[in-house]
Amino acid sequence: MLYQRTIAKKVSITGIGIHSGKKVTMTLHPAEANFGIQFKRIDLPSAETLKADATTVGATENNTTLGGGVNSVHTVEHLLSVLYGLGVNNVFCEIDGPEVPIMDGSGASFVFVLKDTGIATLNTSKKFLVVLEPVEVRVEDKWARIEPANRLIIDSTIDFIHPLIKTQNKVFEFSCENFIKEIGRARTFGMLRDVDMLKRRGLIKGGSLDNAIVLDDFKVMNPEGLRFKDEFVRHKILDTLGDISLLGYEIAGKITTFKSGHNLHNLLCRKLLETQSAYQIVSASSLQKEAVEAFELPLGLSPNFH
């Protein structure tokens, strides 16, 4: 049996929001089975709790935002990706600002914190969303599709007019171990030429070489260079996983994307949920072993009952 997970104890993380530029402290609390991932703005009196759900997503420009107006939490995708990557289903997140801290621009800091905090197993079976028929969304030349598969696979293609990126493709077969090794450390990236334009739109006020890969017209400006030759497409998979996790379940299906972004990922989630014949929710006990074995944690992260 594959059981739901939470964190073993509460933990606080402090950092800067990449878009807001504001210092924020986020405290993650253990939660009971079937609670899901929920956020609460503790800096706003009487703010309603926001559930991490595809239908709760508001803005999707350069990040994924839960909620709308004043009561919103921006840039949730990296944290959500790590929680899915480690099979953690239930967490209550209190945050004293408008945006999840960006840390180093990847999921590595969240992996480290959760590894140190510990993961606890709850005595309730995980549920999987099993894709039964293909669903696709398109916006201009960009598209995303989800179709049946016996485990989660993400086939991502990006295409940028830059000599270091060009067209990159990676097929990622999900497992917790593969996520930690191949995806969790891949950082967000941007072009130096776009900085002024993004700042005029109220974005990347907290961006720096410490929390993003920055490219001029020819090269990476970060002194340490890249962590992977194809770090750019790996980060796209990190984003995709975080956005798709908003379906609310572990996933058995293949996701293929071409030049996708947060908006397209959310459109895909919403269309899938609206197409009732395209999926079913099942207990982990009824799945093929490939999907279940993907959630085995590496040594040092193995969860314990609590």
Image (cartoon, helix red, strand yellow):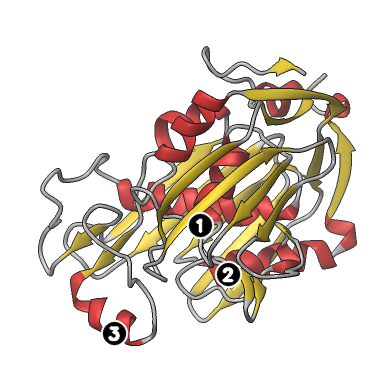
Q: Residue at x 36, y 52 (%)?
A: 105
The total of numbered circles placed on residues is 3
Residue plotted at (42% across, 62% down) = 17
User: In what quadrant of the picture does the C terminus appear?
Assistant: top right
The circle on residue 197 is 3
The residue carrying pointer 2 sits among few (fewer than 14), some (14 to 19) or many (20 or more) residues within 10 Å by Cα, namely many
Circle 1 is placed at which residue position?
A: 100
Query: Residue, x 67% and y 65% (percent of image)?
Result: 268
Q: Are marks 1 and 2 in contact (CB under 8 Å)?
A: no
**Disc 1 to disc 2, C-alpha distance:** 21 Å
Query: Quadrant of residue 204 in the image?
Result: bottom left
Circle 2 is placed at which residue position? 264
Q: Is residue 184 visible?
A: no
Q: Is residue 200 above or below residue 211?
A: below
Q: Nearer the viewer, mark 3 or mark 2?
A: 3
Helix, strand or loop for disc 2: helix
